[in-house]
Amino acid sequence: MIPSFTVNPQLIGISTNEIIKINTKIKPLHPDEEEQKNDYWSAYILKAKKSTFVEIEIEYEIKNTAIDKIKCLWLDIEWGNYGPFGSYKRYDGFVLPYFLDLPKDDSYNNKLIEPIKTHILGTLDDPIDILKTYMPLNCRPTDILTIGESPLAIMQGRYIDYRNINASLISRLICKGFHPTSSLATAPGMQTLINISGPTRVIISWLIGGIFKLFGVKGIFYRLAGEQARLIDDITGTTPPYDKSIVLGPKDTQTFCIEVAKKLNIDVAVVDVNDLGRVKVLSTSNVNNAEIIKRALTSNPAGNANQQTPLVLIRSDELS
Protein backbone atom coordinates (compact mmCIF):
# COMPACT_ATOMS: atom_id res chain seq x y z
CA MET A 1 0.00 0.00 0.00
CA ILE A 2 1.11 3.56 -0.70
CA PRO A 3 -0.37 5.86 1.97
CA SER A 4 1.65 8.93 0.99
CA PHE A 5 3.58 10.42 -1.92
CA THR A 6 5.39 13.77 -1.81
CA VAL A 7 7.85 15.58 -4.07
CA ASN A 8 10.44 18.15 -3.05
CA PRO A 9 11.72 19.96 -6.16
CA GLN A 10 15.22 21.46 -5.92
CA LEU A 11 16.76 23.80 -8.47
CA ILE A 12 20.44 22.88 -8.56
CA GLY A 13 22.86 25.72 -9.23
CA ILE A 14 21.00 28.65 -7.66
CA SER A 15 20.40 29.75 -4.09
CA THR A 16 17.03 29.81 -2.35
CA ASN A 17 16.93 33.63 -2.29
CA GLU A 18 16.95 33.60 -6.10
CA ILE A 19 13.73 31.57 -6.20
CA ILE A 20 10.59 33.73 -6.14
CA LYS A 21 8.16 30.82 -5.90
CA ILE A 22 7.92 27.15 -6.73
CA ASN A 23 4.72 25.08 -6.84
CA THR A 24 4.28 21.34 -7.13
CA LYS A 25 1.20 19.40 -8.27
CA ILE A 26 0.95 15.63 -7.93
CA LYS A 27 -1.71 13.81 -9.93
CA PRO A 28 -2.24 10.04 -9.36
CA LEU A 29 -2.94 8.13 -12.55
CA HIS A 30 -3.97 4.80 -11.06
CA PRO A 31 -5.19 2.53 -13.88
CA ASP A 32 -7.94 0.96 -11.73
CA GLU A 33 -9.35 4.14 -10.12
CA GLU A 34 -11.13 7.24 -11.29
CA GLU A 35 -9.08 10.39 -11.76
CA GLN A 36 -8.89 12.55 -8.65
CA LYS A 37 -10.01 16.17 -8.89
CA ASN A 38 -8.04 17.47 -5.91
CA ASP A 39 -4.45 17.51 -4.63
CA TYR A 40 -5.07 14.99 -1.85
CA TRP A 41 -3.17 11.69 -2.13
CA SER A 42 -5.56 8.89 -1.19
CA ALA A 43 -3.98 5.75 0.24
CA TYR A 44 -3.64 3.32 -2.64
CA ILE A 45 -3.38 -0.48 -2.78
CA LEU A 46 -0.85 -1.53 -5.40
CA LYS A 47 -1.63 -5.10 -6.41
CA ALA A 48 1.14 -7.68 -6.92
CA LYS A 49 2.94 -7.47 -10.29
CA LYS A 50 1.02 -4.30 -11.17
CA SER A 51 2.18 -0.71 -11.73
CA THR A 52 0.73 2.69 -11.18
CA PHE A 53 1.65 6.11 -12.51
CA VAL A 54 2.01 9.63 -11.19
CA GLU A 55 2.01 12.91 -13.08
CA ILE A 56 4.22 15.58 -11.49
CA GLU A 57 3.93 19.22 -12.50
CA ILE A 58 6.51 21.77 -11.32
CA GLU A 59 5.98 25.49 -11.80
CA TYR A 60 8.63 27.92 -10.62
CA GLU A 61 9.51 31.58 -10.90
CA ILE A 62 13.06 32.80 -10.41
CA LYS A 63 14.98 36.06 -10.67
CA ASN A 64 16.29 36.96 -14.13
CA THR A 65 19.85 36.95 -12.87
CA ALA A 66 19.55 33.26 -11.94
CA ILE A 67 18.40 31.86 -15.28
CA ASP A 68 21.88 31.04 -16.60
CA LYS A 69 22.95 29.49 -13.30
CA ILE A 70 20.46 26.61 -13.28
CA LYS A 71 22.10 23.23 -13.84
CA CYS A 72 19.07 21.00 -13.47
CA LEU A 73 15.85 20.41 -11.58
CA TRP A 74 16.11 17.57 -9.07
CA LEU A 75 12.91 15.90 -7.92
CA ASP A 76 13.41 14.39 -4.47
CA ILE A 77 10.57 11.90 -3.96
CA GLU A 78 9.40 10.43 -0.66
CA TRP A 79 6.64 7.84 -0.52
CA GLY A 80 5.17 5.61 2.13
CA ASN A 81 5.24 1.82 2.00
CA TYR A 82 2.71 0.04 4.21
CA GLY A 83 1.99 -3.65 4.62
CA PRO A 84 2.64 -6.83 6.67
CA PHE A 85 6.17 -5.59 7.37
CA GLY A 86 4.84 -2.41 9.01
CA SER A 87 5.31 1.09 7.67
CA TYR A 88 8.41 2.85 6.43
CA LYS A 89 9.53 5.58 4.04
CA ARG A 90 11.07 5.01 0.63
CA TYR A 91 13.05 7.56 -1.35
CA ASP A 92 13.73 8.12 -5.03
CA GLY A 93 14.87 11.00 -7.17
CA PHE A 94 15.60 11.95 -10.74
CA VAL A 95 16.84 14.86 -12.79
CA LEU A 96 14.93 16.99 -15.26
CA PRO A 97 17.86 18.08 -17.44
CA TYR A 98 18.79 21.50 -18.78
CA PHE A 99 20.52 20.90 -22.08
CA LEU A 100 23.66 22.83 -22.86
CA ASP A 101 23.58 24.61 -26.20
CA LEU A 102 27.24 24.16 -27.03
CA PRO A 103 28.54 25.11 -30.50
CA LYS A 104 29.91 22.27 -32.56
CA ASP A 105 32.94 23.60 -34.37
CA ASP A 106 36.60 22.78 -34.93
CA SER A 107 37.71 23.84 -31.46
CA TYR A 108 38.63 20.23 -30.64
CA ASN A 109 41.19 19.96 -33.44
CA ASN A 110 44.11 21.31 -31.45
CA LYS A 111 43.87 18.92 -28.52
CA LEU A 112 44.81 15.26 -28.41
CA ILE A 113 42.66 14.65 -25.33
CA GLU A 114 39.52 16.75 -24.96
CA PRO A 115 36.99 16.55 -22.08
CA ILE A 116 33.48 17.26 -23.36
CA LYS A 117 31.06 19.19 -21.18
CA THR A 118 27.41 18.09 -21.05
CA HIS A 119 24.31 18.93 -19.07
CA ILE A 120 23.75 16.98 -15.85
CA LEU A 121 22.72 13.55 -17.05
CA GLY A 122 19.83 11.50 -15.70
CA THR A 123 17.45 8.64 -16.30
CA LEU A 124 15.50 10.67 -18.86
CA ASP A 125 18.60 10.73 -21.09
CA ASP A 126 19.35 7.99 -23.59
CA PRO A 127 23.08 7.12 -23.44
CA ILE A 128 23.44 6.64 -27.18
CA ASP A 129 21.65 9.91 -27.94
CA ILE A 130 23.90 11.72 -25.46
CA LEU A 131 27.08 10.57 -27.21
CA LYS A 132 25.59 11.48 -30.58
CA THR A 133 24.47 14.91 -29.36
CA TYR A 134 27.74 15.99 -27.76
CA MET A 135 30.20 14.27 -30.08
CA PRO A 136 32.21 16.93 -32.00
CA LEU A 137 31.32 17.25 -35.67
CA ASN A 138 34.92 16.83 -36.74
CA CYS A 139 35.43 13.40 -35.15
CA ARG A 140 37.48 11.00 -37.23
CA PRO A 141 37.02 7.22 -37.46
CA THR A 142 40.38 6.80 -35.71
CA ASP A 143 39.22 8.77 -32.65
CA ILE A 144 38.03 7.20 -29.41
CA LEU A 145 35.09 8.53 -27.41
CA THR A 146 35.04 7.48 -23.76
CA ILE A 147 32.29 7.80 -21.18
CA GLY A 148 32.67 7.46 -17.42
CA GLU A 149 31.10 4.41 -15.80
CA SER A 150 29.14 6.44 -13.22
CA PRO A 151 27.40 8.78 -15.73
CA LEU A 152 26.42 5.76 -17.81
CA ALA A 153 25.11 3.94 -14.74
CA ILE A 154 23.08 7.00 -13.73
CA MET A 155 21.42 7.16 -17.15
CA GLN A 156 20.59 3.47 -16.69
CA GLY A 157 18.91 4.30 -13.37
CA ARG A 158 21.48 2.39 -11.35
CA TYR A 159 21.62 4.57 -8.26
CA ILE A 160 20.05 4.23 -4.81
CA ASP A 161 19.15 6.88 -2.28
CA TYR A 162 21.23 6.17 0.83
CA ARG A 163 18.09 6.49 2.98
CA ASN A 164 16.74 3.31 1.39
CA ILE A 165 19.64 1.17 2.65
CA ASN A 166 19.04 -0.78 5.85
CA ALA A 167 22.52 -1.72 7.03
CA SER A 168 22.85 -5.12 8.72
CA LEU A 169 25.19 -6.03 11.54
CA ILE A 170 27.42 -7.83 9.01
CA SER A 171 27.89 -4.71 6.88
CA ARG A 172 28.55 -2.59 9.99
CA LEU A 173 31.34 -4.93 11.06
CA ILE A 174 32.97 -5.69 7.69
CA CYS A 175 33.10 -2.07 6.51
CA LYS A 176 35.45 -1.17 9.37
CA GLY A 177 38.26 -3.08 7.69
CA PHE A 178 38.42 -0.77 4.65
CA HIS A 179 40.27 2.46 4.05
CA PRO A 180 38.12 5.46 5.11
CA THR A 181 37.99 6.81 1.54
CA SER A 182 36.74 3.51 0.11
CA SER A 183 33.13 3.30 -1.03
CA LEU A 184 32.87 0.13 1.06
CA ALA A 185 34.04 1.82 4.27
CA THR A 186 30.47 2.72 5.27
CA ALA A 187 27.73 0.35 6.35
CA PRO A 188 25.30 1.44 3.56
CA GLY A 189 28.02 1.12 0.90
CA MET A 190 28.96 -2.35 2.10
CA GLN A 191 25.30 -3.35 2.46
CA THR A 192 24.75 -2.38 -1.18
CA LEU A 193 27.46 -4.83 -2.21
CA ILE A 194 26.00 -7.52 0.08
CA ASN A 195 22.59 -7.04 -1.53
CA ILE A 196 24.16 -7.63 -4.95
CA SER A 197 26.76 -10.35 -4.32
CA GLY A 198 25.18 -12.02 -1.30
CA PRO A 199 26.40 -12.14 2.31
CA THR A 200 28.18 -15.49 1.95
CA ARG A 201 30.36 -14.37 -0.95
CA VAL A 202 31.19 -11.05 0.70
CA ILE A 203 32.11 -12.65 4.05
CA ILE A 204 34.29 -15.33 2.42
CA SER A 205 35.97 -12.69 0.24
CA TRP A 206 36.60 -10.55 3.30
CA LEU A 207 38.16 -13.45 5.23
CA ILE A 208 40.38 -14.58 2.37
CA GLY A 209 41.32 -10.99 1.55
CA GLY A 210 42.27 -10.38 5.16
CA ILE A 211 44.54 -13.44 5.20
CA PHE A 212 46.32 -12.36 2.02
CA LYS A 213 46.70 -8.83 3.38
CA LEU A 214 48.67 -10.23 6.32
CA PHE A 215 51.23 -11.42 3.77
CA GLY A 216 51.31 -8.07 1.99
CA VAL A 217 49.00 -9.01 -0.90
CA LYS A 218 46.28 -6.43 -1.38
CA GLY A 219 43.17 -6.29 -3.56
CA ILE A 220 42.12 -9.93 -3.17
CA PHE A 221 38.74 -8.97 -1.69
CA TYR A 222 37.84 -6.91 -4.77
CA ARG A 223 38.75 -9.80 -7.06
CA LEU A 224 36.57 -12.26 -5.17
CA ALA A 225 33.58 -10.16 -4.11
CA GLY A 226 32.31 -9.48 -7.63
CA GLU A 227 32.66 -6.73 -10.22
CA GLN A 228 30.48 -4.31 -8.30
CA ALA A 229 32.96 -4.29 -5.39
CA ARG A 230 35.22 -2.03 -7.47
CA LEU A 231 32.50 -0.05 -9.20
CA ILE A 232 30.17 1.04 -6.38
CA ASP A 233 30.46 4.77 -5.60
CA ASP A 234 29.28 5.78 -2.15
CA ILE A 235 27.69 9.16 -1.42
CA THR A 236 29.88 12.19 -2.22
CA GLY A 237 31.51 10.09 -4.94
CA THR A 238 29.42 11.56 -7.76
CA THR A 239 28.55 15.06 -8.90
CA PRO A 240 25.46 16.73 -7.31
CA PRO A 241 22.58 16.03 -7.16
CA TYR A 242 23.74 12.39 -7.10
CA ASP A 243 26.13 13.08 -4.22
CA LYS A 244 23.53 11.66 -1.81
CA SER A 245 23.06 8.46 -3.80
CA ILE A 246 25.00 5.22 -3.96
CA VAL A 247 25.81 4.65 -7.62
CA LEU A 248 26.31 1.10 -8.92
CA GLY A 249 28.42 0.10 -11.87
CA PRO A 250 26.75 0.17 -15.31
CA LYS A 251 25.32 -2.91 -16.98
CA ASP A 252 25.83 -4.39 -20.46
CA THR A 253 28.82 -2.12 -21.16
CA GLN A 254 30.24 -4.30 -23.93
CA THR A 255 26.94 -4.34 -25.82
CA PHE A 256 26.67 -0.59 -25.35
CA CYS A 257 30.14 0.08 -26.78
CA ILE A 258 29.61 -2.10 -29.83
CA GLU A 259 26.17 -0.63 -30.57
CA VAL A 260 27.34 2.99 -30.25
CA ALA A 261 30.49 2.37 -32.31
CA LYS A 262 28.39 1.05 -35.18
CA LYS A 263 25.98 3.99 -35.07
CA LEU A 264 28.58 6.74 -34.69
CA ASN A 265 31.41 5.19 -36.70
CA ILE A 266 33.90 5.79 -33.90
CA ASP A 267 35.51 3.60 -31.24
CA VAL A 268 33.77 3.86 -27.86
CA ALA A 269 34.88 2.82 -24.38
CA VAL A 270 33.40 2.82 -20.88
CA VAL A 271 36.06 3.75 -18.32
CA ASP A 272 36.59 4.12 -14.59
CA VAL A 273 39.23 6.77 -13.82
CA ASN A 274 40.34 8.40 -10.59
CA ASP A 275 42.76 11.12 -9.48
CA LEU A 276 45.36 8.54 -8.43
CA GLY A 277 46.17 7.75 -12.04
CA ARG A 278 44.25 4.47 -12.08
CA VAL A 279 42.41 3.77 -15.30
CA LYS A 280 40.18 0.74 -15.78
CA VAL A 281 38.65 0.08 -19.18
CA LEU A 282 35.40 -1.70 -18.41
CA SER A 283 34.54 -2.30 -22.06
CA THR A 284 35.64 -1.06 -25.45
CA SER A 285 34.50 -1.58 -29.02
CA ASN A 286 38.14 -2.15 -30.02
CA VAL A 287 40.37 -4.05 -27.58
CA ASN A 288 43.45 -2.89 -29.48
CA ASN A 289 42.87 0.63 -28.13
CA ALA A 290 42.88 -0.34 -24.44
CA GLU A 291 46.49 0.68 -23.79
CA ILE A 292 46.08 3.98 -25.66
CA ILE A 293 43.01 4.78 -23.55
CA LYS A 294 44.83 4.02 -20.30
CA ARG A 295 47.79 6.17 -21.29
CA ALA A 296 45.58 9.06 -22.41
CA LEU A 297 43.41 9.09 -19.27
CA THR A 298 46.10 8.61 -16.62
CA SER A 299 45.98 12.33 -15.75
CA ASN A 300 42.17 12.08 -15.38
CA PRO A 301 41.34 14.91 -17.83
CA ALA A 302 37.61 14.62 -17.08
CA GLY A 303 38.17 15.29 -13.38
CA ASN A 304 36.41 13.81 -10.36
CA ALA A 305 34.65 16.95 -9.12
CA ASN A 306 31.77 18.93 -10.68
CA GLN A 307 33.26 19.57 -14.11
CA GLN A 308 30.28 17.95 -15.91
CA THR A 309 32.65 16.34 -18.44
CA PRO A 310 31.60 12.68 -18.54
CA LEU A 311 32.87 12.30 -22.11
CA VAL A 312 36.47 12.49 -23.31
CA LEU A 313 37.60 12.52 -26.94
CA ILE A 314 40.97 10.89 -27.66
CA ARG A 315 42.86 11.41 -30.92
CA SER A 316 44.29 7.91 -30.95
CA ASP A 317 46.19 8.18 -34.26
CA GLU A 318 48.26 11.06 -32.84
CA LEU A 319 48.90 9.35 -29.50
CA SER A 320 49.85 5.90 -30.77
Image (cartoon, grey):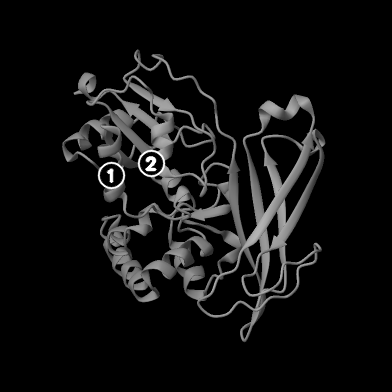
Q: Residue at x 60, y 54 (%)?
A: 93
Amino acid at pointer 1: Glu
Residue located 56% across and 48% down the image: 242
Which residue is at the front of the view, 204 or 123? Answer: 123
Relative to 96, is 31 above or below? below
Where in the figure is residue 34, as x and y percent of width and height? 71, 71
Query: Label 1, on which residue?
Result: 259
**Residue at which label 2 appears:** 128
Query: Is 295 or 177 nearer to us in this picture?
Result: 295
Q: Is residue 18 left or right of residue 106?
A: right
Q: CA distance from mark 1 to mark 2?
A: 8 Å
Q: Residue 132: name its quadrant.
A: top left
Q: Are marks 1 and 2 in contact (CB under 8 Å)?
A: yes
Q: Quadrant of residue 302?
A: top left
Label whose residue precedes the other's in the sequence (1 or 2):
2
128 versus 137 height, above or below = below
Residue 291 visible (yes or no): yes
Look at the image and tell me whether residue 283 can be seen: no
Residue type of the residue flagged with mark 2: Ile
For label 1, the SS is helix
Residue 164 location (% of width, % of height): 58, 65
Q: Quadrant of the C terminus?
A: top left
Q: Position of residue 254 (x, y in %)?
A: 27, 49
